[in-house]
Image (cartoon, grey):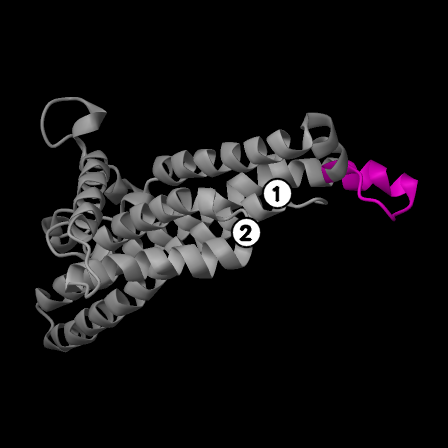
């Protein structure tokens, strides 16, 4: 979080804004040493280490770590991969599992003490993951149906009047190539950005009220801190939900690419 001294200046309370998400390099001048980038690399190390450790000494009677790893993997494999994609789901499970665990870990960084920054609140990271999904489902569709048939099935839905193609074709094309990736990235980014902004607001607002000379305002600081605690639990739910929604939509897009008709 930002420097709390900013909230207690003589000018009064300064509310958080987008500038609180722009963090300088921890050392040097490279963007690679900023907190969000370091957290992304750390999340890759953390997820890889945990799931390698959970499967390294797999046994019939699983340890707690193995049970946790298998539970997460089984959820993605069965509830998203198999149920959404269907018979061809197996080859996409590693991709979906990677997306889910990576997004979830980076989301949860927002409520972990001493880290307290969800990396998905920086738009570049949701866009990067979305590009992987974007190229994957288009590649799968083109490989299965061929480019011309894929575009034809996409833009010219059978059974509707031909004059409607003037409206339907560009709308469908825009949906597949522009709207889907845009909404996929913006949904994740917007939820993480807004949630973290509210956490900063309640926390720094409580600190400002606590240091105020007015005793009544000091009492209200208790409510602000209480809201920050309650909202932390709510944010945990949102962080898990957004990781699930992103992975589910990715599976749905892949399922649509594999379908005989779009």
Dot 2 surroundings within 10 Å: few (below 14), some, or many (20 or more)? many
Q: Which mark is residue 258?
A: 1
Q: Residue at x 38, y 44 (%)?
A: 94
Magenta stretch contains residue 73: no
Q: Is 163 colored magenta in this rendering?
A: yes
Is there a contact, CB below 8 Å, between mark 1 and mark 2? yes
Quarter of the view holding residue 217: bottom left
Query: Residues in magenta?
Result: 154-169
The reply, left or right, for residue 147 in relation to residue 206 is right
**Residue 14 rendering spot, x and y as whole percentages:** 23, 52
Residue furthest to the top in view is: 29
Dominant secondary structure of the residues highlighted in magenta in the image: helix
Which residue is depicted at the point 17% across and 48% down? 56
* 95 vs 223, nearest the viewer: 95
| x, y percent for residue 202 | 23, 63
Instruction: Kindly tell me whether residue 17 is visible in this rendering.
Output: no
Q: Nearer the viewer, residue 70 or 200?
A: 70
Q: Which residue is mark 2?
A: 85
């Amino acid at each position: 979080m930002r420097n709390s001294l900013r909230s207690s200046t003589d000018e009064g309370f300064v509310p958080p804004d987008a500038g609180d998400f722009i963090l300088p390099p921890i050392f040097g001048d490279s963007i690679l040493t900023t907190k969000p980038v370091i957290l992304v690399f750390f999340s890759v190390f953390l997820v890889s280490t945990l799931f390698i450790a959970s499967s390294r000494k797999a046994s019939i009677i699983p340890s707690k770590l193995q049970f946790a790893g298998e539970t997460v993997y089984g959820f993605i494999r069965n509830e998203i991969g198999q149920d959404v994609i269907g018979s061809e789901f197996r080859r996409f499970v590693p991709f979906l599992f990677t997306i889910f665990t990576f997004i979830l870990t980076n989301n949860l960084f927002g409520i972990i003490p001493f880290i307290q920054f969800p990396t998905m609140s920086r738009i570049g990271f949701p866009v990067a993951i979305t590009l992987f999904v974007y190229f994957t489902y288009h590649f799968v569709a083109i490989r299965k149906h061929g480019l011309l048939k894929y575009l034809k099935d996409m833009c010219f839905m059978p059974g509707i009047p031909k004059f409607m193609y003037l409206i339907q074709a560009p709308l469908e094309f825009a949906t597949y190539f522009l709207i889907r990736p845009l909404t996929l990235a913006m949904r994740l980014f917007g939820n993480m950005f807004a949630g973290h902004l509210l956490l900063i607001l309640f926390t720094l607002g409580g600190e400002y009220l606590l240091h105020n000379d007015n005793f009544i305002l000091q009492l209200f600081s208790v409510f602000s801190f209480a809201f920050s605690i309650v909202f932390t639990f709510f944010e945990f739910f949102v962080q898990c939900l957004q990781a699930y929604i992103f992975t589910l939509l990715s599976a749905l897009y892949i399922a649509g690419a594999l379908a005989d008709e779009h």
